Amino acid sequence: MSTSVENRGQFGSKLGFVLAAAGSAVGLGNIWKFPGKAYANGGGAFLLIYILLIALIGTTVMLAEFVIGRKTQKNAIGALRELNAKYAWIGGLGVLTGFIILCYYCQVGGWTINYIVGYITESSVVYADPMAYFLDMLGVNGFPLKGAIIFPLIFLALTSFVISRGVSEGIEKLSSVLMPLLFILLVGLMIRSCTLPGASDGLAYMFNVDFSTVNFNTFLVALGQAFFSLSLGMGVMITYSSYLSKDENLVANTGIICVLDTLVALFAGFMIIPAVFATGIEPGMGGGFAFATLAGVFMAIPGGTIFGTLFYALLFFAALTSSVSIMEGTVAFLVEEKGMERKKVVLSVSVVLFVIGVFYTLSQAYMDIHGVWWSIDGIQFPILGDFMEYLTDRLLLPLGALVTTVFVGWIWGTDNAIKEATSDGKYEFKLAPIWVVMVKYVAPIAIVCILVAGMIFGMAIS
Ligand code: PFF
């Protein structure tokens, strides 16, 4: 049973949509993941590849998702089914990917609350040994009640609350307040970090383009990061644009959101890496990068406790507007396709993802102590936490984006897509011929090449 278009929510204003979509894009991916990946993959060269992939492939895929959503005014699966029933599975793939991401996203979102509370109530404990504090949160010294249960539960409850209020009341209002705040905080912290004594080494690292460190694996990491960061490949942008009115300019929105998201990632990189160099703290990789390492960084900055609290508040805001969008993808599908009640759906989805999520945090602690592989009777298994990220970033997101471009380029057709993108010719789309080539040939071929080469090469080096 489907809900009629009239009964669905809609974004109340143009700015509301831009902020909500940018709120979805800007999240833990930009601030928790991006700086660590840029650091680990060679600094400047990675930045360059990342920007290139966003400009060529990210923008192409985003517009493809926007036109599908706005044309049909439906959730990801319903949208694909309406355009061509044989391809509804593309939406299903997206909803599944989003759900896997949400399981760990809410856990890390909970960690941000843990750190806000930690900075306010016990900053001396955080400062005494930042890595020990981080590992303690993950459960090294016993069951991580705060890190895996209490704070993720609070984060999840906030996400569910916003979602259950619906599109305009919940998502739009939240993003309209938080996004501008986030931007201001980020710029302030970046300036602070770049002006620390010794920060210039970090800046040099970020600007030094050394291609000797680049391989196919670097491209796959950058591609997965680009899709994750832009919230592409899992139907979220299809769902969001389905709430957008027919007279909005989709092409312009695509440009604005891609630029905003990339700026935030770059700002986060320039906030974290120079500070890491300035303080001489060895950056811990993976989950610890924005937590343990930065706690140490703030310790060395005058006024660090205030900057630290602000930083984690920023990370929390960013995570919340993103988790809301991922959950909306799943919820919209169950409400519209299965005719379930919105509040009940939110509750049941939350319970399932929370239970899976707890194991993510538990396995992170295990990973930090024992390494990436879990060994049972001589057989090695990937740790759940890493496995979930690996599966989504390196496989499901590129795959989701690939089938979306093939669908729009070859099945539904670029003429239909351009008609929707320009609101039936109301807006000019000068780059339309280029976009057609991108969506039909360049993006799918590039994704396949990077996916295959990256997987083979990635396997070989891990
Ligand atoms: N783009 C978000 C981030 O960078 O943190 C994460 C995200 C949101 C991923 C929405 C997927 C998604 F559907």
Image: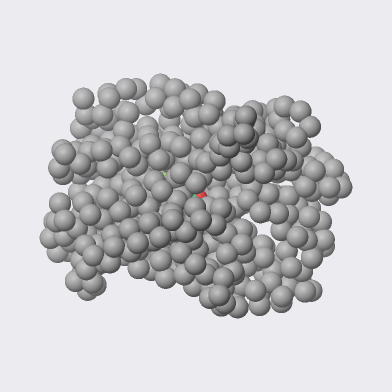
- Residue sitting nearer the eye, 398 or 376: 376
Examine the rendered structure and indicate whether residue 121 appears above or below residue 229: above
- Left or right: residue 452 versus residue 422 is right
**Residue farthest to the front?**
378
Residue 344 position, x and y percent, is 40, 21
User: 186 left or right of 145?
Assistant: left
For residue 121, above or below residue 395: above
The image shows residue 112, relative to residue 18, as above or below, that is: above
Toward which corner of the image does residue 168 lie, by quadrant?
top left
| x, y percent for residue 183 | 56, 60
The residue closer to the viewer here, 68 or 19, is 68
Q: Is residue 122 left or right of residue 203?
A: right
Question: What's the residue at 71%, 58% (across, down)?
Answer: 283
Q: Nearer the viewer, residue 311 or 52?
A: 52
**Colour mode?**
one colour
Residue 182 visible in image:
no
Q: Position of residue 56 (x, y in %)?
A: 35, 68
Residue 411 visible somewhere in the drawing: yes
Q: Please name the residue shown 57% across and 59% down the image.
A: 37
The residue depicted at 40 percent of the width and 60 percent of the height is: 453
Which image quarter: residue 370?
Answer: top right
Residue 418 location, x and y as percent? 17, 61
Left or right position of 406 against 392: left
Residue at 15% over, 42% down: 84
Where the N terminus falls, by quadrant? top left
